[in-house]
Image (cartoon, rainbow, N blue to C red):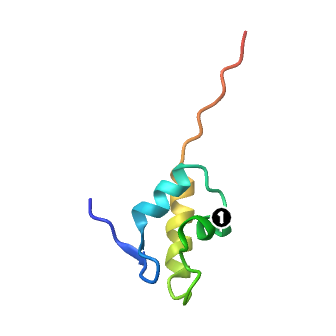
Amino acid sequence: MRAMYICMCNAVTDHDIRREAGNGVHTFAELQARTGCSDCCGCCEQEARATFDKALSQVTCPLPLVAA
């Protein structure tokens, strides 16, 4: 699947956003700090937030094993 650029100013793709969500990024501010997404002109913020929110909703968290 080809990547779609979300933030043209900082060359951040939808794949980058999904990867960061999978790597434990939990807030949009943290995503901005790691990728630079939507910290320049801001035109992409709505799409970036939507992509990030969808990615977060698809992240699975493994349950810890509990000793019996």
Looking at the rendered image, the quarter that the C terminus falls into is top right
Asked whether 8 or 65 is in front, the reply is 8
Determine whether 39 is above or below 14 in the image. below
Q: Secondary structure at mark 1?
A: helix
The crowd level at tag 1 (other Cα within 10 Å; few <14, some 14-19, many 20+) is: some
x then y, percent, for residue 50: 53, 71
Residue drawn at point x = 45 percent, y = 83 percent: 9
Q: Position of residue 61 (x, y in %)?
A: 59, 39
Judge whether 46 appears above or below 68 on screen. below
Q: Is residue 16 left or right of residue 1?
A: right
Amino acid type, mark 1: Glu
* Image side of residue 24 versus residue 55, left or right: right
Q: Residue at x 57, y 64 (%)?
A: 53
| Image quadrant containing the N terminus | bottom left
Tell me what residue is drawn at x 62 percent, y 68 percent.
33
User: Compared with residue 33, is residue 45 higher up or lower down, i.e. above or below?
Assistant: below
Q: Quadrant of residue 29?
A: bottom right
Identity of the residue drawn at 59% across and 81% down: 39
- Extreme-left residue of the structure: 1
Q: Nearer the viewer, residue 62 or 12?
A: 12
Q: x, y (%) of residue 19?
A: 47, 55
Q: Quadrant of residue 62?
A: top right
Count of picture labels: 1
The residue beneath circle 1 is 30
